[in-house]
Image (cartoon, rainbow, N blue to C red):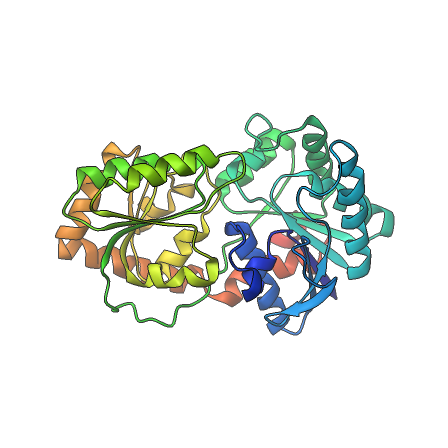
């Protein structure tokens, strides 16, 4: 079986030379999945964007195929060329038995058409709660929304990050799915390493991530050391500049700006708590990056109430409600140790690589429907 993963932004995760380019959690997950499949002897390819790299090259043990450059071509017609033409060209060069994508967007529809034309399997994974509700889709054009829905309905199998996403997907699109956990790289550092960051926040600087909430919490807790890492996001550059300027005026907050995925581990390794302030997510990659290091989380977003149900920290309604739990966990050794123990136990129980990969492998290889995969 040959598997082709399609994620145009994954090259910066795989290749040191491009590590400073913007990435998000899904780019990380695609890279980790590709490497995990390759370790198991599966013939895997990753279709990536054009960053100026060779048309085909191997990075970190994973073969990649170049498609199109973001922003290339003339408005309107660039949807046809280079986007459609070069994406299909890359899919054809991959010559895979099954194609795997995630995140709502036009690429899923184009991949679905390709797979139907060439009789290949298509597997899609939900990346955010917004992917499951047409009223909240983070997709700009009606054409791209239609293509996404077409691809969703013509996928051979769909993976979700949470039970909530399963329910939303079935309610709004009539599509069944299988819940799959997140992959994570194990750190080299011990869970007992020196931790000189009291509260860490990591995300792209976007409105839905609500970085302003962390500034409010940092001001309310001046005795603690807060660190914020996040890069610019297209269309929201003004937000980045505003947060950067405000953060500079908060003495106990260190603003790092964008930090490459390949370099972010040193911040996680130093953190005592992780803070999530988002209004909308899927299952944040940063959650498992924290938990695998024994770091409890205080969050305004809690998928399937996994934090609250398992004692992995504290889930709250807003930034005002974060202040008390953060102070309690940092000041109360018994509370902190209990949360850290729960976190490490949860990771061992739910995020072993073999267990996480099982639903991915089942959907990639077949059977044809998610219902059969559950049996």
- In the figure, is residue 114 to the left or right of 335? right
Which residue occupies the foreground of this view, 367 or 44? Answer: 44
Task: From the viewer's side, name the closer residue of 24 and 246.
Answer: 246
Q: Is residue 300 visible?
A: no
Residue at the image point whose x is 13% and y is 51% from the top = 331
Q: Is residue 118 visible?
A: yes
Q: In which quarter of the image is residue 143?
A: top right
On the rendered image, what quadrant is the N terminus found in? bottom right
Q: Where is residue 72 in the image (x, y as percent from the top left)?
A: 71, 43
Q: Relative to residue 68, is residue 138 drawn left or right?
A: left
In the rendering, at what x and y percent does residue 185 appear? 46, 65
Image point 65% across, 51% down: which residue? 8
Residue 152, image quadrant:
top right
Q: Which residue lies furthest to the right in this view?
A: 117
Tell me where residue 180 appears, x and y as whole percent: 54, 53
Residue at 76% of width from left, 31% of height from top? 76
At a point 31% along the width and 33% down the height, the residue shown is 317
| Quadrant of the drawing holding the C terminus | bottom right
In the figure, 353 relative to 271: above or below?
A: below
């Amino acid at each position: 079986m040959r598997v082709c993963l399609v994620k145009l932004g994954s090259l910066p995760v795989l290749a040191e030379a491009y590590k400073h380019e913007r990435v998000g959690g899904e780019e990380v997950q695609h890279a980790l999945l590709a490497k995990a499949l390759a370790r198991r002897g599966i013939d895997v390819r990753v279709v990536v964007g054009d960053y100026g790299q060779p048309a085909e090259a191997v990075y970190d043990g994973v073969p990649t195929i170049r498609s199109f450059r973001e922003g290339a071509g003339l408005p309107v017609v660039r949807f046809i060329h280079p986007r459609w033409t070069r994406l299909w060209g890359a899919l054809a060069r991959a010559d895979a038995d099954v194609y795997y994508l995630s995140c709502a967007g036009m690429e899923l529809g184009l991949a679905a058409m390709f797979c139907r034309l060439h009789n290949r399997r298509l597997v899609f994974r939900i990346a955010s709660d917004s992917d499951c509700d047409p009223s909240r889709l983070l997709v700009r054009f009606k054409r791209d929304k239609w293509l996404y829905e077409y691809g969703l309905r013509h996928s051979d199998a769909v993976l979700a990050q949470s039970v909530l996403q399963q329910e939303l997907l079935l309610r709004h699109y009539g599509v069944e799915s299988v819940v799959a956990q997140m992959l994570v790289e194990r750190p080299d550092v011990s869970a007992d390493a020196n931790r000189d960051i009291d509260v860490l926040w990591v995300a792209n600087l976007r409105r839905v991530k609500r970085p302003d909430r962390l500034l409010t919490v940092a001001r309310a807790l001046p005795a603690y050391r807060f660190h914020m890492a996040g890069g610019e996001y297209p269309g929201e550059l003004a937000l980045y500049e505003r947060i950067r300027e405000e953060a500079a005026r908060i003495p106990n907050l260190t603003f790092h700006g964008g930090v490459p995925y390949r370099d972010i581990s040193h911040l996680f390794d130093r953190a005592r708590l992780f803070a999530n302030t988002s209004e909308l997510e899927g299952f944040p990659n940063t959650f498992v990056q924290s938990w695998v290091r024994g770091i409890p989380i205080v969050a305004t977003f809690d998928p399937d109430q996994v934090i609250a149900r398992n004692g992995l920290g504290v889930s709250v309604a807003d930034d005002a409600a974060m202040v008390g739990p953060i102070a309690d966990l940092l000041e109360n050794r018994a509370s902190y140790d209990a949360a850290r123990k729960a976190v490490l136990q949860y990771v061992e129980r739910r995020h072993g690589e073999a267990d996480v990969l099982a639903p991915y492998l089942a959907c990639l290889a077949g059977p044809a429907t998610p219902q059969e995969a559950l049996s």
